[in-house]
Every structure is written in C-alpha cells, then in structure tokens.
Image (cartoon, rainbow, N blue to C red):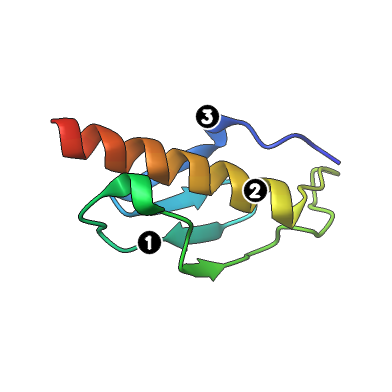
Amino acid sequence: MTKATRDQFEFRSDILVVHRPTGATFSTYRYENPEEGTYPVHATIGRAGEILESGEEYSEYEVRTMAAELLRERALLSKRG
C-alpha cells in the first residue's frame, strides 16, 4: 500500500477535501463546535483501494482517516479564526 500524505489532498471548500491521486472526495457538516466531530458524512471513494495506473494503491481507510483529520483541523482553525 502507498501511504496517503497531507500534500495529496486539496480543499475545494472549508468542508470539502479531495484526495488527488484517487479522486476520493470527503465532506462534512459545519459543526457549531468542531470538537464534537467532523468525520466525513459524505464520501465518494473514487479509486481508493484500487491499483492505479502508476502502480500505487491507497487504502480506503487510510485516505478516509487522513481526510477526517484534515477536515477537523480546518474546522478548528475556522472556529478560532
């Protein structure tokens, strides 16, 4: 498996992030209190879990987990900001 890294993700908005290599997208609600959770509530897995033309293969779980972390961080920054 290829490790999903932060730099592979692109924010399309403050609640939508895309994993560029696989095309997987993740979005969440705008939580009043981001500490309550920002786990993606809508996901399109794209090609996560498949072997890509480049030979890379990203775990769906790992991509989803990294997306959740990034969304939570963004929500906390927005709340402070």
**Residue 21 vs residue 13, the one in the foreground:** 13
Q: CA distance from mark 3 to mark 2?
A: 12 Å
| Quadrant including the N terminus | top right
Q: CA distance from mark 3 to mark 1?
A: 20 Å
Residue beneath the point at 70% across and 46% down: 62
Q: Secondary structure at mark 1?
A: loop
- Identify which amino acid the numbered label 1 is placed on: Thr
Q: Secondary structure at mark 3?
A: helix
Residue beneath the point at 40% across and 43% down: 72
Q: Which residue is disc 1 drawn over?
A: 28
Q: Which residue is disc 3 drawn over?
A: 7
| Quadrant including the C terminus | top left
**Residue 64 vs residue 4, the one in the foreground:** 64
Q: Could you say which quadrant of the image residue 70 lies in? A: top left
**Residue 55 vs residue 32, the one in the foreground:** 32
Q: Which residue is disc 2 drawn over?
A: 63
**Residue 71 vs residue 17, the one in the foreground:** 71
Q: Are marks 3 and 1 in contact (CB under 8 Å)?
A: no
Q: Earlier in the sequence, mark 3 or mark 1?
A: 3
Across and down, in percent, residue 67 comes to: 52, 47
- Tag 1: Cα neighbours inside 10 Å, few (<14), some, or many (≥20)? many
